[in-house]
Image: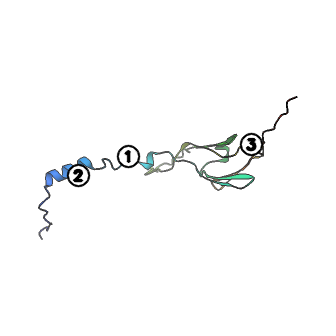
Amino acid sequence: MANISRWDPFRIEPFDDAIDNLFRGFMVKPFSMDLEKQSPRIKVDVKEDEKNYTVHADIPGVRKEDIHVTVDGNRISLSAEVKKEEEEKKGETVIRSERYFGQVFRSFTLEHEVDENATRAKYSDGVLELTLPKKAVVEAKRISID
């Protein structure tokens, strides 16, 4: 059976392929965005009411001993270390490994300062829940001059 192809009178095969290859990806994306090579980020949800901030952070596959939370005024920093467990069995070969091992870090600022002494943290099912009470706003006090 013969191959039937559509003939385009304006297409010049060697030149069109070369031009297509030359400009492929040019000015479309300035650099490669290979998502597998980027380290993962801690994803957070932050909610606010009149007294507290509530933060839910997804940190799966981490022991609670390897999670560190720092409160400095209105700046919150989260870090965690995912440790790779070296367990190889005889006759077993790893075909593909997509899990990330290493350090992850996330830091953000809130509008109000946080009372670090009353902060509570709970870690369950891969989700870190922080309750961050807002500090009472201290108004400037006017001092009378004698």
* Quadrant including the N terminus: bottom left
**Residue 98 point in image, percent of width and height:** 47, 51
On the image, numbered disc 1 is attached to which residue?
32
Amino acid on which the number 1 mark rests in the picture: Ser
Amino acid on which the number 3 mark rests in the picture: Glu
Mark 2 residue crowding within 10 angstroms, few (<14) / some (14–19) / many (20+)? few
**Residue 100 point in image, percent of width and height:** 51, 47
Return the residue found at the far bottom.
1
Tag 2 secondary structure: helix
Q: Residue at x 75, y 44 (%)?
A: 115
* Quadrant including the C terminus: top right
Q: Earlier in the sequence, mark 2 or mark 3?
A: 2
Looking at the picture, the colour scheme in use is: rainbow
Q: Is residue 124 above or below residue 115?
A: below
Numbered-mark total: 3
On the image, numbered disc 2 is attached to which residue?
20
Give the camera-side residue of 59 and 74: 74
On the image, numbered disc 3 is attached to which residue?
116
Amino acid on which the number 2 mark rests in the picture: Asp
Q: Are marks 2 and 3 in contact (CB under 8 Å)?
A: no
Q: Residue at x 64, y 56 (%)?
A: 125
Q: CA distance from mark 3 to mark 1?
A: 41 Å
Q: In screen coordinates, is 77 left or right of 94?
A: right
Q: Is residue 125 above or below residue 39?
A: below
**Residue 123 point in image, percent of width and height:** 68, 52
